[in-house]
Image: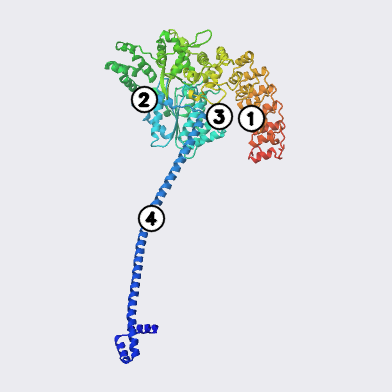
Amino acid sequence: MAQLLSVLALSTKAMTDRKIKKILKKLVGRKDIEDALLQLDMLTKEESLMVVVRNLEVTHRVDGVVHEVDDNVKATKVLTEDIDNNTKATKVLIEDVDDNVKGIEGIARSVDNVTHELKRNQMQEKLRSWLSPPDPSVNHNTACKTHHSGTATWFIQGSTFQDWKKNGSLLWVRGNPGAGKSILCSAIIEDIKNMREARPALIAYYYFDFKDAFKREVRGLLTSLLFKLGDDSDRCWDVLYKLYTSCRDGSEQPSDAALAGCLKSMLELPGQLPIFLVIDALDECPNTTGTPSAREEVLDFLEDLVRSSHSNLFICVTSRPEQDIQTVFNPLTSASRRVSLHEEGGQMEDIMSYVHSFVHKDRVMRRWREEDKKLVITTLSERAGGMFRWVFCQLDTLRRCMPSSIRKALNELPTTLDETYERALQGVPKEKRQHAHHLFQCLVVAIRPLRVEELAELFAIEFDLHAGPNLKEDWRPENPEDAVLSACSTLITVIENKDSKIVQFSHFSVREFLTSDRLRTSEIGNIRHYHIPLDAAHTILARACLTVLLQLDENVDKTRLEAFPLAFYAAQHWIDHVMYEDVVSRCQDAMERLFNPNNPYLAAWIWIHDVDSDLVRETIHALEERPTRPAATALYYAVLCGFSGLANYLINTHGENVNAKCGRRGTPLHAASYNGHLGAVRLLLAHGVDVNTTTNKSKRTPLCSAYDGGHLDVMRLLLEHGADVHVYYDGAGLLFHEASFSGRADVVHLLLQHNADVNVGGNGNSTPLHHASTMGQARVIQILLEHGAVVNAQRGDHITPLYRASQFGRLEVA
């Protein structure tokens, strides 16, 4: 019923009022109907309330949903904003990450660059140690210090020099002694350096220097040029490094030919920059006896370079017009590429400018009357004859004059450098003559430039004692530099060299004059006594060195050593002086004291300079605190140095063991054989040494050591005294196999002469022919075949020499 009423109520609700009234008229009067309608009305009211309630509920729910949707929309909006912000932040973060990645990549590249630079610096030091190139920058800086405003401008701006800079080949600047060639050379170098800012190029320069033994040799020139080019160019560096690796990573020294070939390889690199080579004072490279002389080797090298016609090669050489240099250079240069300084007006102008600058800046001469200064400038400029050196010497003399004697001095000027030097020697005070002579002698033959304090040590040595020289420490001058210069400042000078001061002749012509026959035969006063024979000079310096070493007793340590400035030079070079001609006989007593096993001096010498090691200690800081017992016997060191007479003294007087196992080489005979001291080897053999003795470290005999040192005459002597011809060499087998492998035809022939088995087997039963065929050593193969080598000999693996030659591509011998 309820459901029916509900339906009816809904139906009624759906009808219009007119329809309802029409229906109700028909039904009025029926009680059941009235009751039903009453109930229906109630239900309708309830339903309306329920609808309202439901509508309210729905509305409430809808409101709730709307609020929820609104909240969600707001949340979504916030979320969207957050997403936008996060997106922006993420983008920024990504950009930061990109920047950081780029930064890390940059850091990585920087680390790689730093690592590469460190590795290169380490390798650079290895190569420097390997080549030991002289440093020409010292000479260059010294020359540059003499520049004044406008120095060599006439030459630098001249057409000859400018044309050479464009077209290359050889430019030869020649001049007599003292013409200022080194000053001009330094100006050329500076101009090329400045030019490189606009025109990329490589430059290497070199100053031959009579004061430094290594700077007088072709090897010094080659190593210095190569190292400089390699330092300036990565591509040149790679070429130099290839030479290093070819020499077993620096364990072997390259030949001069290999060094020259390396320079050519640098020139021939594809797209190579122009290479400027500037070489000063070629005449200071000695042209002494010998075939060839050092200068001949340099001239051959330069001639070969010029004739190779490299379009990127520019060579400039300064020298005196010596005949041998002219013979080589004249055919290589046109007249326009040969500059004679004495014929150039610009040279005269430079001299006048120099004199004017000196007179007006010197602290003494600048106070002179103007007319006196003008007279000096005019007189010296007119009489210089293109000679800077002559002008300098006259200025040095004139600045000491009183104003009243200036004109007299100008009227009596010497006309030549020889006459200038003669007057300088005459002016040495009588009480300083012997000291001056000793200084001159040491400067003439010193192996390297001597520092002021080293040379001043001569003042503390008493040479004229029958028992030998003696060092008296209380004789040392308080001011070494003043003492040295006071001997004769016109002929010697002190220059700054990095962190020290060195003494040198003021010009090459001074050394030349002191050793010349002109001075030896001079009739002027007693100046001929200053003449310096080389053997006498080497004797003085050798005695000075030994005198210092004999002060280093059992109490010496690093602190005590500092009191002997000459000690390092003495330790490193006394042998060089003693070995000159017959000097050793004049120093025998001192040498016996040094090597006496009962004295402490030998240990101190080896402590400073171990002659049995490649390591050279240059400073006190590199030493242990004090000397320790040497690693070898006195006899070992004596024969290592080639002192046969001293070795005989040690054997006969001190009973030294000729077969002692000691030292880097293993035994005294190994040491003497490796260094090629034939007399020392002969002495040891005469005293019954075991010719086939081995070392504690290997089976190698002295014959192997002589082979390693490249001394065929020593090998022959050892074989004549019973050395084993089939001696073990190394992992490859016998010495015979090694010589065949390396192409040492002279050694192979010598071994066969002493009955070596031409088919002797080594490791794997390889014969000498196998080894020679592997390396394609045609001359050795020919010798072996002539002596009956079996062509088809088989190793343990049945491989023949022919197969080895073919396997390694040695088709020329296969």
| Quarter of the picture holding the C terminus | top right
Q: Nearer the viewer, residue 323 or 364?
A: 364
Looking at the rendered structure, the kind of residue marked 1 is Arg
Q: Is residue 464 above or below residue 259?
A: above
Marks 3 and 1, how far apart in space? Answer: 16 Å
Q: Are marks 4 and 2 in contact (CB under 8 Å)?
A: no
Residue 359: which quarter of the image?
top left
Q: Secondary structure at mark 1?
A: loop
The amino acid at mark 4 is Asn
Mark 4 lies on residue = 86
Residue for badge 3: 255
Residue at x-position 50% and y-position 25%: 622
Instruction: Say whether residue 651 is left or right of residue 189.
Output: right
Provide residue 341's location: percent of width, then percent of height.
Answer: 40, 24
Q: Quadrant of residue 763?
A: top right
Q: Crowdedness of circle 1 by 10 Å Cα count: few (<14), some, many (20+)?
A: some
Asked whether 296 or 635 is in front, the reply is: 635
The residue pinned by badge 2 equals 147
Type of the residue with mark 3: Ser
For mark 3, give the secondary structure.
Answer: loop
Q: Position of residue 725 (x, y in %)?
A: 69, 27
- Residue holding disc 1: 744
Query: Would residue 304 be found to the left or right of residue 349 on screen?
Result: right
Label located before the other in sequence (2 or 3)? 2
In the rendered view, does 232 fall on the left or right side of 751?
left
Q: CA distance from mark 2 to mark 3?
A: 38 Å
Choose the circle earlier in sequence order: 1 or 4: 4
